[in-house]
Image (spheres, rainbow, N blue to C red):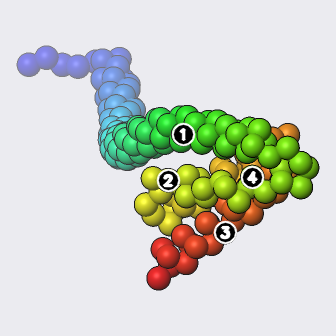
Amino acid sequence: MMIQSAADIDNTAELKQWLFKENVKLENAKAEFSDAVIDFEREKQKFLKMEQETNSHNRILQEQLRQEKELFEKKWKILERELRQLAKDKKQVDIDRQIVARQKEQYRKLNADAASRTDYKSNIKPDIFFKGVNSELALKKRYKDLLKIYHPDNMNGDKDVLQAINAEYNYLKHKYEN
């Protein structure tokens, strides 16, 4: 057996005390590390939840975008179709205008006096203005277009032609309403 000296005992006591302090420090560090791990896990869960919410929100936005794009394409096709129809209607109105102009000119040539020149309107066949109209909506649309063309305030406008248009419009309007 070895006999320990007082210096060795003091060193051992200091070593034990130092080891005890280091052990306390390690335990504190271990507790702080455990707390940091728990905080990290909480932050990780928050982040994952935020990521899920963001992904869900993005899916909703993508679906809305897809629906809006689909709606836009449908509207675009409708606009294209209506534009083609408008071009056809415009050609028809131009043809009708030429017919009316020819009728006016023929009547003017047939009647020399000033009083009879205004009677040419009675020979105008009003059914040419709404030819091909088969619904109340189409009737209103054609009527508005004709008003823009034949209104007396316009350069080529004519009061008597407009009266004939109004008469035919009122007749057809009552016909579609009943």
Quarter assignment of residue 50? top left
Which of marks 3 and 4 precedes in the sequence?
A: 4
Q: Report x, y in % for residue 105.
A: 74, 38
Q: Report x, y in % for residue 49.
A: 35, 46
Quarter assignment of residue 52? top left
- Residue ID at (59%, 61%): 140
Q: Nearer the viewer, mark 4 or mark 3?
A: 4
In the structure shown, which secondary structural element does the residue marked by tag 1 occupy? helix
Q: CA gap, disc 1 to disc 4?
A: 22 Å
What label does residue 131 carry, if any?
Answer: 2
In the structure shown, which secondary structural element does the residue marked by tag 3 occupy? helix
What label does residue 92 carry, if any?
Answer: 1
Q: For mark 3, does the 10 Å Cα neighbourhood hold few (<14), some (14 to 19), or many (20 or more) residues?
A: few
| Disc 2 and disc 1 in contact, CB within 8 angstroms | yes
Q: Nearer the viewer, mark 1 or mark 4?
A: 4
Amino acid at circle 2: Lys
Which of marks 3 and 1 precedes in the sequence?
A: 1
Q: For mark 2, does the 10 Å Cα neighbourhood hold few (<14), some (14 to 19), or many (20 or more) residues?
A: few
